Amino acid sequence: MANRMALIAGAVAATSLLAGAVLPAWAGEDYPTRERVEYVLGCMRDREGPQQELLYKCSCVIDKIAEQMSYEEFTKDATTSNALSIGGERGEVMRAYVDGRRLARELRAVEKEARKACFLD
């Protein structure tokens, strides 16, 4: 009986240590579900092919991006990249932003690497 209790206590301790080691790695950097879904839907919309296959590949891409960039970095880079394409006076503010093109290139590079790793494109 004592041996069984020690075994259970050891298993609980090991599980606690494992949870403590894993949770901090993703808890603070995880992207909101809504953001992941919007990215996957946009990715699927922009491509042709079997929907189920695109679902898996596009989900893989956003997961790979999340491994490389914090959500804050992704949001900043994606917003800047999208704003650079705005024409006219409204877009001039972003085009004048010194780091804007660098941020857009950074996002494109991470996305390209993620698409390659997920066999998309």
Image (cartoon, helix red, strand yellow):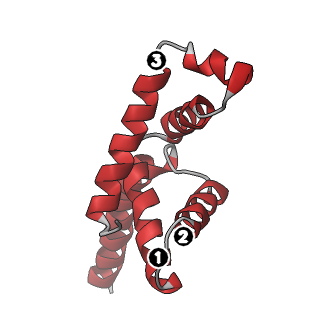
Label 1 and label 3: CA atoms lie apart by: 33 Å
- The amino acid on which the numbered mark 2 sits, given as a three-letter code, is Met
Q: Earlier in the sequence, mark 2 or mark 1?
A: 2
- The amino acid on which the numbered mark 3 sits, given as a three-letter code, is Asp
Q: Position of residue 1 (x, y in %)?
A: 33, 87
Q: Secondary structure at mark 1?
A: helix
State the quadrant of the C terminus.
Answer: bottom left
Q: Nearer the viewer, residue 68 or 80?
A: 80
Name above or below for residue 29 compared with residue 9: above
Q: Position of residue 23 (x, y in %)?
A: 44, 54
Regarding residue 68, the answer to whether it shows in the image is: no
Horizontal side of 39 relative to 2 (left or right) equals: right
Q: Using the image, tell me which numbered label, if any, was put on residue 54.
A: 1
Regarding residue 5, the answer to whether it shows in the image is: yes
Tell me the residue that label 3 is attached to.
99
Residue 89 occupies quadrant: top right
